[in-house]
């Protein structure tokens, strides 16, 4: 029983993508810390605790989903379920999507603060978004 559950957890695409994004954000944070000679929200004890908490919570939530058979898609009408072509979305997958969005913003912020070349229109939109939505860029 546990072997099949652990294999299912290890092969869960949602968890893999969230873990990949956490690793990528950590790498970008390390680069930014080295560039700016200071720790930041992606790299350091606070960032490490936050990232570990995210991954641990996903494992817990996916375990809860497996034990309870929880599936958010049961509450969605059939006509919309066929569009997504996804058999199940539990609390683990839901929070994976939220964490993915959170880490994506952190990655973009690190890219901006590192000065990674990007098209001017993209840099302007990213700067406006970061000023409006985060407190790390001064308005």
Image (cartoon, rainbow, N blue to C red):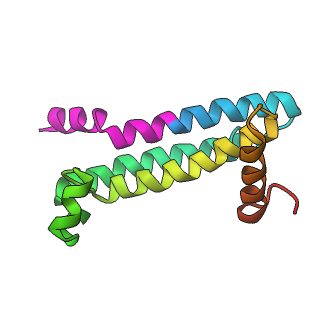
Q: Which residues lie in the magenta part?
A: 1-20
Position of residue 22 relative to residue 133, above or below, is above
Decide whether residue 8 is among the magenta residues.
yes
Give the quarter of the image for residue 27.
top right
Position of residue 51 relative to residue 65, above or below, is above
Decide whether residue 131 is among the magenta residues.
no
What residue appears at the point 75 percent right and 65 percent down from the top-left corner?
132
Position of residue 79 relative to residue 45, above or below, is below
Report x, y in % for residue 139: 87, 63
In this view of the protein, can residue 50 be seen by the observer?
no
Report x, y in % for residue 45: 69, 42
What residue appears at the point 71 percent right and 63 percent down from the top-left corner?
133
**Which quadrant of the rendered structure holds the N terminus?**
top left
Position of residue 89 relative to residue 27, above or below, is below
Main SS type for the magenta part? helix
Is residue 13 found left or right of 139 in the rendered image?
Answer: left
Is residue 62 found left or right of 97 in the rendered image?
Answer: left
Give the quarter of the image for residue 8.
top left
What residue appears at the point 83 percent right and 55 percent down from the top-left corner?
137
Report x, y in % for residue 5: 19, 39
Q: Nearer the viewer, residue 128 or 110?
A: 128
Q: Nearer the viewer, residue 13 or 120?
A: 120
Give the quarter of the image for residue 51.
top right
Q: Nearer the viewer, residue 71 or 81?
A: 81
What residue appears at the point 19 percent right and 57 percent down from the top-left corner?
82
The outermost residue toward the left is 1
Report x, y in % for residue 119: 74, 38
Number of on-image labels: 0
In this view of the protein, can residue 138 be seen by the observer?
yes
């Amino acid at each position: 029983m546990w072997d099949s559950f652990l294999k299912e957890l290890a092969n869960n695409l949602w968890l893999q993508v969230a873990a990949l994004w956490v690793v990528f954000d950590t790498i970008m944070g390390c680069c930014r810390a080295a560039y700016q000679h200071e720790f930041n929200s992606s790299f350091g004890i606070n960032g490490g605790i936050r990232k570990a908490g995210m991954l641990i919570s996903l494992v817990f939530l996916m375990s809860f989903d497996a034990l309870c058979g929880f599936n958010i898609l049961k509450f969605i009408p059939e006509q919309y379920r066929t569009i997504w072509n996804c058999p199940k979305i539990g609390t683990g997958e839901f929070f994976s999507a939220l964490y993915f969005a959170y880490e994506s913003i952190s990655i973009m912020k690190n890219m901006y603060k590192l000065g990674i070349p990007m098209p001017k229109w993209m840099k302007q939109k990213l700067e406006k978004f970061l000023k409006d939505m985060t407190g790390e860029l001064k308005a």
